[in-house]
Image (cartoon, rainbow, N blue to C red):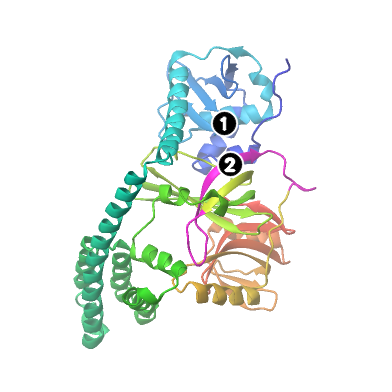
Amino acid sequence: MLPDVTPRYDREQVLALAPDAASSNAGQKLASSGAIYKTHTDIQHSDLIIGQCQGSGARPYIIACDLSQPAIKCTCPSRKFPCKHGIALLLVYTDNPAAFADKREADAPVKEWFAKRRDKLDRIDKVDKAQTAPKTPEEVERNRLEKESRQAERLRKINLGVEDLDRFLQDVMREGLATMRRDTNAFNERAGRLIDAQAPGLARYVTELGAALNSGDDFETRFFKVLGPLVLLINAFKNRQYLPDGLIEDLYDQIGINRNQQEILNQAPEQDIVDDWYVVSQNTTQEDRLKMQRNILWGRKSGKYALILYFAHGASAFAESIMPGAWYRASLAFYPSQYPYRAIIRHKEWIPDVQDDDGGVILPAVELEQAYQLWSQALASLPWLNCMPIALKGLRATRSRKHLMDNKGRALAVSLSKMQHLDVLSVSNGRTFDAFGEFDGRKFDVLCIFSDHRSRVSHDD
Ligand SMILES: [Zn+2]
């Protein structure tokens, strides 16, 4: 039988896995210099490829990759994930999959790693199945009552927290902002109380208020920008019996009563959106020990965008992964909202060759004027909307990293990294270009730049 010679990933997708530019460069150097040797595929699992690389230690590092994800394991001491050896191994594979035609048994630690991974994936699968397993009517009823009483108790606490917050904000307005500026601790204290009241979402608003109050020149503008939605939130909570169902979900989400993933997956699969989804952008941020990956997908039939979040602690890898620039045929369960955006991938299947002639993707882009209209419509349906995903056309670079210009000469506030600024300057070269990002009615967070209307996915610097 002929070995499988079509690599599952291309170079760009592999390089996108690198945690930083240094790893990406080092990986490419290792791959092209022939430093990865003894490459082979495991005899039992065609998804498991292995190679070696001589590092500074006496023994060579053993590198393994589970191609189904891809997930990488290396015996080197690097804390980066994946390390440069892992990147290099995958690059050798994408450049020349035939280098792995040799089928041999992987050594014990690699087999153990692979078995554990597969075991974990199986377990996750089983837990999913157990949670959706049919229960007796008595069990269902008992669970429902328990949940209702927990929810009622929580709402009672939040109610007290909201009343307390309302009084506090009225005091702030009576005392005046200048007085309150001297007593910033009051805001942190209040935020702490709201966390006790199980309303972490409200606590975040109050912390932001305190920060805005002490943010230097023009602090009033920033203060009222946070205060407006917060007061609206308090009033909406007090009058929640009059709100439409969809908006209740958003109200609870803002207050910090979050739905867990399982609840979303328990929604009827018929409500999912099944489409060919393109991974437009991927960014990873880290706060304390928590890593968060934001993936934005675009469905080519539905025309919808979906935000997929992955979380991981410290140096551990994300349990799931998708690749920027790749296409997946996937079924997405959306969080209920007046402006559905965040979603969970229920099933996905990588589609290797969805490409048009030039290998690019055309996202529907609008002019700035229309973006403002779309924003006001979106805001009318969900007043606490932070931002919306949108592709803008006819943009021009300026000399500042803080502004782009549209083709009517109007400025659009952005904050470009140095790399992005160089990108837009070189892509546009005096002409207009399109860009994808998140827009909050005022500022555009550029995530991806198009040249000749073809997407080029930009990654973290
Ligand atoms: Zn390594």
Name the residue beneath numbered marker 2.
348
Residue 347 lies in the magenta stretch = yes
Q: Amino acid at mark 1?
A: Ser
Q: Is residue 90 above or below residue 305?
A: above
- Residue at x 61%, y 39% (from the top left corner): 349
Q: Are marks 2 and 1 in contact (CB under 8 Å)?
A: no
Confirm whether residue 217 shows in the render: no
- Residue at x 55%, y 38% (from the top left corner): 24
Relative horizontal placement of residue 399, taking residue 201 as reference (left or right): right
Marks 2, 1: nearer the viewer:
2
Q: Main secondary structure of the magenta part?
A: loop
Residue 407 lies in the magenta stretch = no
Q: Residue furthest front?
A: 137
Classed neighbour count for the residue bearing mark 1: other residues with Cα under 10 Å, few (<14), some (14–19), many (≥20): few
Q: Nearer the viewer, residue 418 or 340?
A: 340
Dividing the picture into quadrants, the one containing residue 172 is: bottom left
Residue 309, how many percent across, how many down? 47, 50
